[in-house]
Amino acid sequence: MSSSDSRNGKDREATTLSRRSIFKMGLATGIAVPMSALGQAPNRLRPQPGDQLVFEEGANQDELVRPELLELEQRPLSALARDPETQVLRDGSRLNRVMITRIDPQKLTARYQANAAEGVIAYSAVCTHTGCDVINWDAGQLRMACPCHESQFDIYDGANVVGGPAPRPLAMLPLEVVDGVVIVAAGFRGRVGFTQQF
Ligand code: FES
């Protein structure tokens, strides 16, 4: 099994199971849910404000993301957040992965401009349809594309859906640049992952 297979849906992480829903399940079934089981390991936490970003692929793999390492409107590259103090990489959940690229900030829809840092933007890698990683790229139309059912997302418009069955945009991760390094400015804007339909 290739790594992309495991990234594209094999990981059956229950995206809709929040801490609250787990707790409610415990109440409904009468099964005690130990509070310790609800604790999040640092590597499973979503990207936190102040986290650095590290390339997961490409010529600068494992390096910190800096604006000058990204070419304008290049195919988005996957990256993960890293706690700058503990050096813990937040690789414990595929919901933490983001796709980053650099754009012309003047062309970004106004309400998303505060989420960009020197033109660098980051969107969740997880498709809102059924959770595949959005790893394809339409360089002509500047759209991220999902390989599973061909949903397309406009990088200049908050990853709004412009094709395919995805029901909502990809979540956007607000960024800033401090001392030349791209860091996380705030938690994801929008819901990460997908909602299973039963
Ligand atoms: S999982 Fe992305 S389009 Fe279906």
Image (cartoon, rainbow, N blue to C red):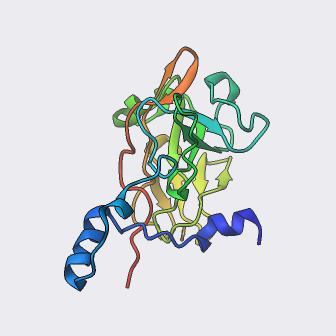
Which percent across, then down, holds residue 183?
A: 50, 29
- Which image quadrant for residue 103? top right
- The residue furthest right is 59
- The residue furthest top is 179
- Which image quadrant for residue 158? top left
Residue visible at 52% across and 28% down? 85
Which percent across, then down, holds residue 37?
A: 38, 64
Q: Is residue 178 above or below residue 121?
A: above
Question: Along the line of sight, which residue is nearer the eye, 31 or 146?
Answer: 31
Which percent across, then down, holds residue 105?
A: 49, 27
Residue 137 in the figure: left or right of residue 158: right
Q: Is residue 97 above or below residue 9?
A: above
Residue 141 in the figure: left or right of residue 13: right
- Quarter of the rendered structure image containing ligand 1: bottom right
- Count up the numbered dots: 0
Which percent across, then down, holds residue 138?
A: 66, 52
Question: Along the line of sight, which residue is nearer the eye, 192 or 70?
Answer: 192
Residue visible at 44% across and 49% down? 45
Question: Along the line of sight, which residue is nearer the eye, 34 or 122?
Answer: 34
Q: Quadrant of the N terminus?
A: bottom right
Residue 192 in the figure: left or right of residue 88: left
Residue visible at 66% across and 68% down? 6
Question: Along the line of sight, which residue is nearer the eye, 12 or 155?
Answer: 12
Residue visible at 37% across and 85% down? 198
